[in-house]
Image (cartoon, coloured by chain):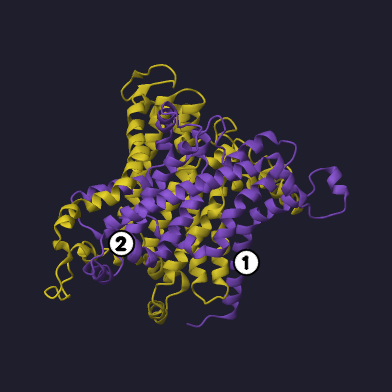
Chain colours: A purple, B yellow
Amino acid sequence: MKTSNLERAANYVILIAFALFALGPMFTIVKTALGPENADAAQDGTSLHWGNFSAAWEQGELGKHLTTSVSVSVIVVVVAVFFSIMSGYAFGTMRFKGEQVLFYLFLLGIMVPTEAIIVPLFFDLRSAGLTNTIWGVALPQIAQSVAFGTFWMRTYFRSTNVAITEAARIDGAGNHRILWSVLVPTARPAIVTLVLLSFMWTWNEFLIPLVMSPRGEVRTAPLALAIFQGQYVQGTTLLAAAAVIIALPVVIVYLFLQRHFIRGMIEGAVRE
Amino acid sequence: MPSSSAGTDAPPARGEITRPAPGRAVGTVKPARGGSTRGRWGKLAPYGFILPAFLVYAAFLLYPLLRSVHLSLFDYDGLTVGTFVGLDNYAEVFSSKALRASFLHALVLIFFYSVLPVMIGLVLAAILSRTKVRGLPFFRTVVFLPQVIAMVVVAVAWRQIYAPQGSLNTLLRDVGLDSLTKTWLGDYTWTLPAVGFIGTWVSTGLVTVLLLAGMSRIPSDQYEAARMDGAGAVREFFSITLPSVRGEITVALTLTIIAALKTFDLIYMTTSGGPGNTTSVPSFEVYRRAFKTGEVGSAAAVGVTLTVLIFAINFAINRWGDRSNR
């Protein structure tokens, strides 16, 4: 179809305007993070104050909290992805009694908001002595990721070529051999997407670590930012620097593997 | 799931692994399923594979959900023994002014998180898909970025924009609109729209990317035929583009409405429900009631009501979306 140069130019204007709108707030926060922290700092002649990042790191104890975030994320991602591959394999390739009911039960979990489970989770896990432990923060998030992961891996395994697994079975391979040596290596793209999404959700999660660790012993990075915002009232420079540090890991991974994020978040929307 | 992956869900693919495919030379190779041990265990195998996932899921999601329903029937302060009050907590959701307001605020947020982004996204995607533009992958990466940034970080950024001496007021002063400057996060009228607009910022990229993908699948001969009939851009949009992306609109609405109803981090970090209770939302009420004011039963009831609302809206949207995909 033919389009005029005017229309093409208008398109670029829209693209640029929209991109600026999306980047604006991020630019604001980076600019604040690199600005002078106080009048003294404004005097020293440098325009970019990279020292703010190390100052924020120390004052916000970010090293400690980022370590907690990494631990929680590793536990959630490893366990949830491993379990999801197994259950997705069963739902995607086998037929059994109660399959439908069980699958819909898992689907339910994708839609249930954290707000619906957080209240009893706190009181019950406190009785079980799990609050203020890393497991109290990780286990509910494993459950949420497993719900999505089962759905995601099932969709993938259903689309795999039956002939490959059938050939392996005739060669005498059992279920575990078929899953881990035949299917999983070819499922890498689907698994990478699942790993990235569950990492992002866990890293960014706020309500669960807020409630499950009332004494603040298992404080993940986003929570540390909220506390920092409460304590650090004299300015916004270090707060912005801390925020940039906390957002950075996911943003970097996203910039390299954005296709997985976009595909996962769009195709992962449940419609059954 | 968008229509693209619906094809992979076709029934023939399932279950065939457990039996020899009809096309194969079954007679020449002994069927692997014949082995006695595997036959017995084969029936249990699927349950074995599901068990680990199911145990975690049942213990930390299903069970708490049922416990929420149970708790919601009690007047419980989190310390002493609760008393059974039946459906009183649910009656309160409808009768209490504060709770009714919080659900109303959630509806306002739905407008900002879903309706506005879908309208903007439709217009932008329709314009952009009319011509081949270079740099679209880069554009997609940029506008999708707000989706991957932690909400607490988004909140910190927007607090600086909305601050009395922040960039929004500075911008307004620079262009001579001093009269419009205000304390965006401390104003009884403007705080809810200001917070909602953060949601618009977060959602619009996702929605536009989704709609662009949908529109790129519309065959171009449909447009050519319409142009031969003398249809203008607007007619084209309403008679071809809009009906073709109904599936994508469904997905966009589902994702963003759920995001709107689950707004917690943003409220916690920007306004804590204030000023007054002008920005309190159900998720924030769940937290406040359960962990600050000792109204645990009421908190559970709000959580359950919110869940029912999410399911109902999801169901309604998908019914609407399916009518076109018969």
Horizontal and vertical percent position of residue A238:
72, 44
First in sequence: mark 2 or mark 1?
A: 1
- Per the image, label 1 sits on a secondary structure element best described as helix
**Number of dots carrying numbers:** 2
* Label 2–label 1 contact, CB within 8 A: no
Depicted B156 relative to depicted A30: above or below? above
* Residue A54 seen: yes
Horizontal and vertical percent position of residue A102:
26, 47
- Residue occupying the point 36% across, 57% down: A152
Label 1: how many Cα within 10 Å (few below 14, some 14–19, many 20+)? few
Residue A16 numbered mark, or none:
1
In the image, taking residue B240 as reference, residue B283 lies left or right, namely right
Horizontal and vertical percent position of residue A190:
40, 62
Depicted B222 relative to depicted B293: above or below? below
Q: Would you name the residue on which mark 2 appears? A: A177
Q: Nearer the viewer, residue B46 or A4?
A: B46
